[in-house]
Structure formats: structure tokens, C-alpha cells
Image (tube, helix red, strand yellow):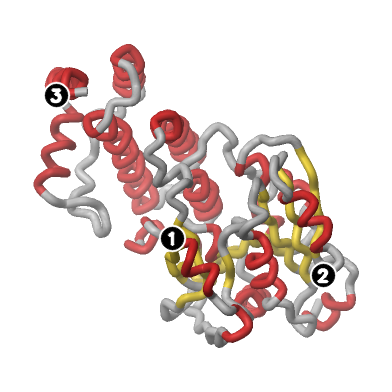
Amino acid sequence: MTLQQQTMDDKPLLSVILPCYNCSATIEKTLQSLCLNKDESCMRMEIIAVNDGSTDSTLDLLENLQSIYPELKVENKENGGLCSARNAGLNVASGKYVYIIDPDDFIFPGVLPQIIREMEKKSSSIGVFGIKQRMSNEEVNDVDLTAMEIPQIEFNEPFQSTMFFSSPAFVFTTFLIEMVFRKDMIGNDRFCEDICIGEDAVFIRNQYLKDVKMSFYKKPLKTCGYRILTTGLTLSKNPERVRKRELSRIGLLREYNKMKAGYNGNNQDVLKKLDLLDSFHVYGLFVGQLGNPFLSKTEIDKLYLEMEKNGKFPIVDFTNEPYYPCDFRSKLLRQIVNHKWLYKTVLNIRYLLN
């Protein structure tokens, strides 16, 4: 079926999933950016906004915006978190392709038609179209989307997605905002609702492991705006939110365990990279407690024991890998974490200082 025939079909070619929670202050710019990506000669698009139990005016605003944006469909559900909202969107998406974006970010005009054309032309299941531009809340609000030039994206020849594990870019290419997926490739995969950090990376890397054809940009271009919010979970210093973030690392480790256990191939680069990721997350979990111990001694002891039983120690030396920390401090901390008696001694001192 040609693109022309597909546009005649009632079924959209692209489903955009937009999880929404208390985002009345930012959602209009996101919707505007998506609709500046409309191209009826290339694709029909549906925008599925999932209201995740918002307590502000988000739901009313979304329903009012449907008169302006006919592509917009609103799903309403009880609050379950970001991953739950994304999963609800995936469950009702009807397009051949899926794009997921948060309601405080935006995509540059004209980007999505380019990646859809490329994926259709090359029969790719994953498309990566560029890199994010990190912006403050004020910078995003000041952007005039209608005055932006459309970036012209060049693509490399497609390659198998598992080959991406050999690339240094693998470490950072984990943002949903810069990717499109074929929905039939995603299948029944969903976001893990038990974790609140790194969930994008887990989902994306599970798709890479399927060894499907992947289209990747040739030259890095700014194609999406990624809003930096100090109130978000990643940057928040609120004790309760930091504790939630640290506990989420435990779930993240378990997800990577499943990922390794479920990999049936024999690509040594894949196995090596999964081991490196696993070790880096173990490192992050325990070093985080040395910096600011939000977990109790009992919780730490239980975790360390679990990691020992699961063969997480000694941590693989990741300090010579591209993009991983390689300074003396990181090497020293890795050795501390690898030796339980030393780790507990340093941790006890840290508790006393607290």
C-alpha cells in the first residue's frame, strides 16, 4: 500500500501518545507543535491525550482544545502515574506508528512527516530523528513555533537495532521524544509501572533487543525541545521524592535482570552492554546512599544481600567505556561498593554525619 492509499484510509498512520497530569500551563504549546507536524500528503495523525487524574483544569482544557485540534482524542482515567498513562494510550492507539511525548515538551515543525516517510521507504521498525535541546521553563515558553525553520533530516542506511548496543550513542539515545516505533513491533510490551526513573530507557532497550531494522539520523540536529523542570522527580531535592527516586532504582535493576534473562541472541556486544548497564545502576544505587542516605541501614543490608545473591558483585569496570565516569573518584567509589565491609564502614560514617 502506498502512502497515498494510506492517507485515504480512516485509520491514522501515526498515533501520538500524550500522558497528561496537571499540565494546563504547558499542554497548549505541545499540541501546537504536534499540529505543526501535520502533513496530509504523508500521514493522518491522531493525538491521544490521557488525563491521568489531574487535579487542576487539565481535563477541561483538553476537552475545549478538541474544537481547535480535531486530531485530539481525550482519554480520562484515575491517577496511576506517567507509565500508567502511557500504557493506557498504547492500549487504544490505532496507528501503524507510535510517538510518545510528554506534555511539557515540544517537537520542531515538520519533523514527524520526515521520519514517517523514511520508515515507510526503508521498512524500519524504529526511527530516531534527532537530539533534544534542553531548555528551561522560561526558554520553552518564549519559543515561537510558527517562526521556526523546519530542520531537514538526513538518514543513514538502516541497520539492525541490536547493532546499536555497539555504539557509544547507545548510552544516551534513551529519550522517547526523539523516536518513533512501529506499533506491531511493540506488541504487548508496556512501560513498567513500578519504576519512576529510567523507565524510558528500559522500554526503548527492550525494543532494540528485538533485532529489527532501525533508521537513524546522519547528522545531529535540534529537533525537539526538552523542558527542564526543577520540580520534577529527577532534579527534585525534596526528601520524600528523593527517597522515591532511590527506591525506584531497585525496580530498575530488576527490569534489567528481566531484559538479560529474556535475551535469546548471542551478540557479545549486547551482553557486554547489558552487564555494563547493570553494574552502573548497582553503582548508582549504592553510591547514592553514600552521598545522602535516604534508605535505612536495614534496607541497605537487605538490598546488598539481594545483590550478592543475584551475582551483582564485583561490579564490572565501566570506567573505560565512552560516556561513563572515568575519574579517580568514580574508580574509588566502585571499589568501595564492591567490598561490603568497606562500604558499610563508610556508610556508617555517613549516617553519623547526617
Question: Which amino acid type is shown beneath numbered disc 1?
Answer: Thr
Disc 2 target residue: 68
Can residue 234 be seen in this snapshot?
A: yes
Side of 261 where 118 appears, left or right = right
Which residue corresponds to the image point at 72% horizontal and 73% vertical from the top-left?
A: 35
SS at badge 2: loop
Can residue 257 be seen in this snapshot?
A: no
Contact flag, marks 1 and 2 (Cβ < 8 Å): no
Disc 3 target residue: 346
The image position of residue 323, as x and y in percent, is 27, 58
Q: Residues within 10 Å of mark 1 (few under 14, many from 20)?
A: some
Question: Looking at this rendering, what residue extends furthest in the top direction?
Answer: 298
Q: CA distance from mark 3 to mark 2?
A: 59 Å
Contact flag, marks 3 and 2 (Cβ < 8 Å): no
127 or 352, nearer to the observer: 352
Of callouts 3 and 1, which one flags the residue occurring earlier in the amino acid sequence?
1
Disc 1 target residue: 173
294 or 180, nearer to the observer: 294
Which residue corresponds to the image point at 82% horizontal and 57% vertical from the top-left?
A: 73
Question: Which amino acid type is shown beneath numbered disc 3?
Answer: Val
SS at badge 3: helix
Give the answer, above or below, for where 15 lies relative to 303: below
Q: CA distance from mark 1 to mark 2?
A: 34 Å
Dot label at residue 126: none
Quadrant location, the C terminus = top left
